Image: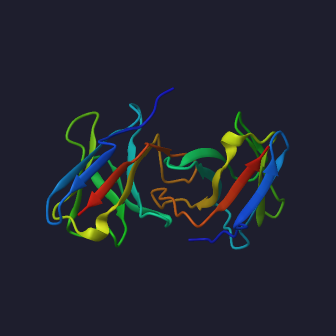
Amino acid sequence: DAKTTQPNSMESNEEEPVHLPCNHSTISGTDYIHWYRQLPSQGPEYVIHGLTSNVNNRMASLAIAEDRKSSTLILHRATLRDAAVYYCILLSIGTASKLTFGTGTRLQVTL
Amino acid sequence: EPEVTQTPSHQVTQMGQEVILRCVPISNHLYFYWYRQILGQKVEFLVSFYNNEISEKSEIFDDQFSVERPDGSNFTLKIRSTKLEDSAMYFCASSAASGTGAYEQYFGPGTRLTVT
């Protein structure tokens, strides 16, 4: 499985934008970039995914570098409810889509 | 909004006993998964299931584990003879499709299994 690298932790102030980076230098052409998050004491939650183009949904935006070796999850206005561990995961074609979770980035949001 | 549900939320069992964890995936989804998370550790893939058979399983998913879709709505994980190290949160997930990497998975709230 192609590997991802994320910072262990980040902090943000409430109402500020947050940019969560992910490096995936060994990504293959058919790997999708997925982001999930896990709030305290809850199951993982899907956030967003993309292949080559930037993506927006109601939760976040995903900016993908032109060479696809890195991506950034953007929370436009962090709230206290966004405090969670964020996981960047690559999903390959033909793997039955099992998610391989790393340690992710723990996002702390403060007032 | 449709969601994955799991029962029970917490199960306490004695070592050596059998447990069945239950999940109701999102109704039009075709692919089903079980993951587990030991306290303080990463979420780990256990098994994926499609068309009434296992698609992929991890090395954790040994002969003590089995999965079943007994009817059109439930998806179960059975642990035949529980061990202390099976204590963990077990998450069920489902997705509409699979195989291309293009489909997201939706997770349930989990069942906390405590083996004493």
Q: Position of residue A52 (x, y in %)?
A: 75, 53
Left or right: where does residue B64 sit relative to residue B26?
left
Residue B24 x %, y %: 33, 37
Q: Is residue A46 left or right of residue A25?
A: left
Quadrant in which the C terminus of chain A appears = top right
Residue in the picture at 30% in, 65% down: B86
Q: Is residue A65 above or below residue A36?
A: below
Is residue B47 or residue A53 the one in the foreground?
A: B47
Q: B25 or A42, which is in the foreground? A: A42
Residue at position x 50%, y 65% in the image? B42
Q: Is residue B102 left or right of residue B33?
A: right
Q: Which one is nearer the viewer's eye here, B88 or B116?
A: B116
Q: x and y percent of residue B73 in the render?
A: 29, 34
In the orientation shown, which residue stands out farthest toward the top? B1
Q: How many marks?
A: 0
Q: What's the residue at 27%, 38% (across, down)?
A: B74
Q: Position of residue A65 (x, y in %)?
A: 82, 59
Q: Residue at x 19, y 54 (%)?
A: B19
